[in-house]
Amino acid sequence: MKIDLHIHSTCSDGAFSVEEIFQEAKTRNIDLLSLTDHDSIDCQERAIAVARQYGISYITGVELNVAFLYLDKSISLDFLGYQCDIGNQELRSELRLMREHREERARQILEKLNAEFDKEGVERFTESDLDNIQAKVDGTFGRPHIANYLIEKGIVRDKQEAFDKYLVKCNVPKYPLSLAEASWLVRNAGGILVHAHPNDPHGTSLVTITRDLSEQMNIIEEYMLEYIDGIECWHSRHDERTTAHYIGFAKKHSLVMTGGSDCHQKPILLGTLDIPDWVAEQFRRNDNLI
């Protein structure tokens, strides 16, 4: 059985549409998947319908960015919400506010970019440039879309250079969603909250605080356990040691264990992780598979 419970579509920063993801999933013989777009459930209704067309089991999903307060410092972490009722009004309302904040954040980032451009003699971005970026967004507006535009304009060679040269220093804080708020939103919508890629060395993870796995687990025990229902043990940037540690931790605390490629389709990573069949059984027991 092939499982992938962490995939992004064009409803956030993925390169593939819902249909393209399921076409690829069918080609790769994936049996169970979940689309987990950043702060968006706009593609979920379509995903449910297409999953049925392809005969692929499906779990509704969303990835929420949380401002995690640790020792009086705000750390950006990601959490996955599964099995949510996509019609839940509180969840939809909060995600709408988050989307509006992203758009305003993008505008502020462009203002900071212009300040950098002025120093370098690069032509400033105008309202027309913002409109051009937004026109190519089929989902949630974020820094990757600005990076793509910087590449298109020939200002940088690739996304890595876009972030290294501009988008890190020109960043603006994300929507201040707390872990308690994220937990309430997901659970109130009938879902479960899973800590995403806790030891991702290149992403939004506890590595920001410490690379020591035991210290990471202590942080989860002390600050997160009352708010989360599971841990993403398998991830494309988790090594075997990380996965083994988090499986043991999840079993100790009776947490749901999930896994996914975190595929944004460049490169195509769908279904490349060896995730055991019993991960699906955790959801089947509650009759939550579509």
Image (cartoon, rainbow, N blue to C red):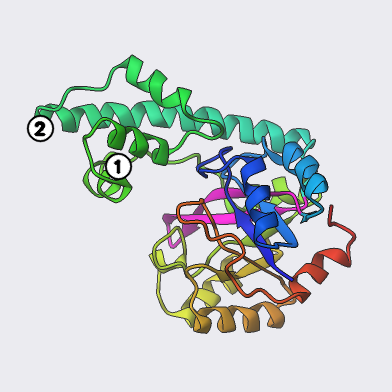
Left/right of residue 225 with respect to residue 131 in the rendered view: right
The residue depicted at 54 percent of the width and 56 percent of the height is 263
Say what amino acid the circle numbered 2 marks: Glu
Residue occupied by mark 2: 120
Residue lying at 40% horizontally and 26% vertically, measured from the top left: 133
Disc 1 residue type (three-letter):
Leu
Q: Are marks 1 and 2 in contact (CB under 8 Å)?
A: no
- Residue 183 location, x and y as percent? 68, 53
Question: Which badge, 1 or 2, is on the more N-terminal residue?
Answer: 2
Read off the magenta span: 59-83
Q: Which residue is located at x 59 percent, y 71 percent?
A: 273
Location of residue 8 in the rendering, given as x and y in whole percent from the top left corner: 57, 48
> What secondary structure is marked by label 2?
helix
The residue nearer to you, when weighing 208 against 146, is 146
Q: Please determine whether, in this image, residue 251 is positioned above or below residue 107.
A: below
Residue that carries the numbered disc 1 in the rendered image: 167
Label 1 and label 2: CA atoms lie apart by: 15 Å
